[in-house]
């Protein structure tokens, strides 16, 4: 999977429905949540880079994935190591709860939520739906992180 150019992303629900499975559409375009312990990646330990299922944007790496026993893939940080970078964080008060929703900054896909109960050093747990991401085992986590750093350096980037 590679990044999808912005102009090739669907502009309406019909286009997204053609591109995504019913569960992927429900999770990413309707802010749904897959059942705990059912997603493809909650117990996955393969190395690679996790990309947005909708647009292919690299979002998380296996280096930041940890076992949280919450039933969903959990990451201590996004690929660019910053809040409101590759992922956007927005207050979410649905269902009478106070949470912070995580979405893909590039295409707006709902990914999951972020909590302040993760392991050191960040203390953060990005709780992400498997249906919203795809593991790219060919995109080495170290190379992905280096590419993100170089994009921010003057004179480098895409």
Image (cartoon, helix red, strand yellow):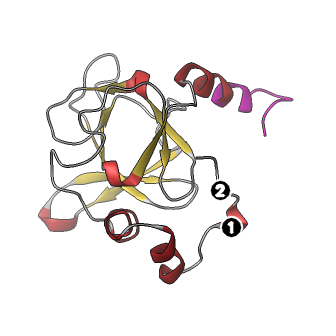
Cα–Cα span, label 2 and label 1 = 6 Å
On whether residue 109 falls in the magenta region, the answer is no
**Residue drawn 39% across and 63% down?**
28
Q: Is mark 2 on a helix, strand or loop?
A: loop
On whether residue 157 falls in the magenta region, the answer is yes
The image shows residue 11 at horizontal and vertical percentages of: 59, 77
Rate crowding at label 1 as few (under 14), some (14 to 19) or many (20 or more) other CA atoms within 10 Å.
few
**Residue drawn 34% across and 54% down?**
131
Q: Do the residues labelled 2 and 1 touch (CB within 8 Å)?
A: yes
Position of residue 144 relative to residue 113, above or below, is above
The image shows residue 19 at horizontal and vertical percentages of: 51, 69
* Residue 75 falls left or right of residue 14: left
Write the start and end of the magenta stretch as one range. 148-158
Rate crowding at label 2 as few (under 14), some (14 to 19) or many (20 or more) other CA atoms within 10 Å.
some
**Residue drawn 51% across and 59% down?**
54
- Kindly identify which residue carries mark 2: 4
* Residue 9 falls left or right of residue 109: right
Q: Which mark is on residue 56?
A: none
- Kindly identify which residue carries mark 1: 8
**Residue drawn 23% across and 63% down?**
93
């Amino acid at each position: 999977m590679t990044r999808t150019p912005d102009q090739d992303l669907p502009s309406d629900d019909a286009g997204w429905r053609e591109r995504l499975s019913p569960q992927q559409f429900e999770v990413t375009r309707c802010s749904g949540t897959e059942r705990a312990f059912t997603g493809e990646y909650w117990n996955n330990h393969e190395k690679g880079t996790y990309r947005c299922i909708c647009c292919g944007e690299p979002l998380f790496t296996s280096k930041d994935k940890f076992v949280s026993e919450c039933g969903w893939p959990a990451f201590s940080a996004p690929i660019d190591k910053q809040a409101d970078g590759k992922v956007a964080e927005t207050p979410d008060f649905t269902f009478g709860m106070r949470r912070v929703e995580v979405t893909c900054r590039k295409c707006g896909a709902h990914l999951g939520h972020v909590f302040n109960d993760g392991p050191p050093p960040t203390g953060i747990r990005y709780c992400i739906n498997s249906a919203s991401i795809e593991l790219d085992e060919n995109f080495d986590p170290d190379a992905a992180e280096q590419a993100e750093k170089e994009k921010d350096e003057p004179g480098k980037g895409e």
